[in-house]
Image: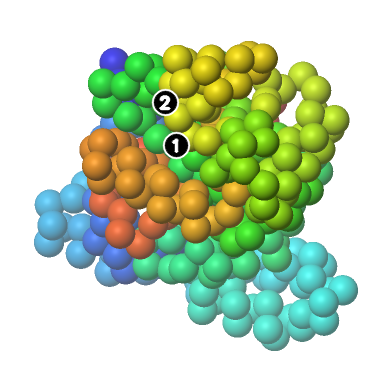
Amino acid sequence: MGFIQIIKEKARANLQTIVLPETSDLRTLQAAHSALQEKIAKIILIGEEAEIKQRAKEHNLQLDEAEFINPASCDMLESYVELFVKLRAHKGLSEKSARALLLENPLYFGVALVKSKKANGMVAGAINSTADVLRASLQILGTKKDSKLVSAFFLMIVPQCDYGENGIFIFADSGLVQNPNAQELASIAIDSAKSFEALVGKKAVVAMLSHSTKGSAKHPDVEKVIEATRIAKAEAPEIALDGEFQLDAAIVPSVGKSKAPDSPIAGNANVLVFPDLDAGNIGYKLVQRLAKAEAYGPITQGIGGAVNDLSRGCSSEDIVGVIAITALQAQQNKE
């Protein structure tokens, strides 16, 4: 059984309700159809039921088991408006503006469903930017109590790979934080370790990546990674984490032993923390395209609810995978 199939099995064991707000996108409707057929989640679709069902019928999609909510005719709209205003009153949000956002922007309405517990999670980003998805999420859900910032990672599943956790890795941050400082990089590493263990069920082994291994190069960029490693070790000593490492020293046992013989992490990493977004984004796309890896994400961490972004180049199958991951995150949020 492949890894994503294991995630789906876990999702089936305790069904969560996931809202999909981008119902004008065919891939989203195809993913809703598949998620319902595979019974990995209950699905809420935002929009006019008749219009969505007509489009689904045109493409031979079965959505009868989904719940449809049109914000304009929703009985709970006023309570969502009141909730939104209460959350953003300190920022000067008026009742009129809150109502307009909830009626006109499905992302805000979807996040309101998560905040009010009508839904357990949301998946969006097929036709909206990461910035748009996260803006709605943070304004209504905020950050997690035990997180210092919101970041994003890709869950990478590399076929026929002996490295990592049998080819399973987290690459972070590969989708959101442009140029993290040392403290932010440490927070990304700590949250990524927690995400790996929650999703994969194995112990995280975290490598702080650089173009240097244990002082082989001198540069302010290297110093940032060294400082981030120090901070992360101090804040979360229970996590198996070390750095700074070049990529080969992080994942190849023989190279790790040669370049960093005193580090138990070297050569054994399954969580790769990149020094900036350029490196992380380029890295995940190289592995995805050249190694034909499955890349699920960007999966967000640090938000006060299970909300995940999608790449706008995603397939419907990618969306189904992220629905399953979001459902698993929602299960864990209840624990």
Color style of the picture: rainbow
- Name the residue rendered at 43%, 61% in the picture: 125
Expressed as whole percent of the image width and height from the top left, the position of residue 239 reads 71, 22
Crowd tier of the residue under label 1, counting other residues whose Cα lies within 10 Å: few below 14, some 14–19, many 20 or above: many
Expressed as whole percent of the image width and height from the top left, the position of residue 113 reads 59, 55
Name the one closer to the observer, 107 or 39.
107
Q: Is residue 79 left or right of residue 248?
A: right
From the viewer's perspective, is residue 7 above or below residue 138?
above
For mark 1, give the secondary structure. strand
Badge number at residue 168: 2
Residue 36 appears in the rendering: no
The residue carrying mark 1 is: 155
In the rendered image, which quarter contains the C terminus? top right
Expressed as whole percent of the image width and height from the top left, the position of residue 296 reads 40, 42
Q: Amino acid at mark 2?
A: Ile
Mark 2 to mark 1: distance in Å?
7 Å
Choose the circle earlier in sequence order: 2 or 1.
Answer: 1
Name the one closer to the observer, 202 or 335.
202
From the viewer's perspective, is residue 101 above or below residue 165?
below
Q: Mark 2 and 1 residues: CB-CB less than 8 Å, in contact?
A: yes
From the viewer's perspective, is residue 194 above or below residue 309?
above
Residue 278 appears in the rendering: yes
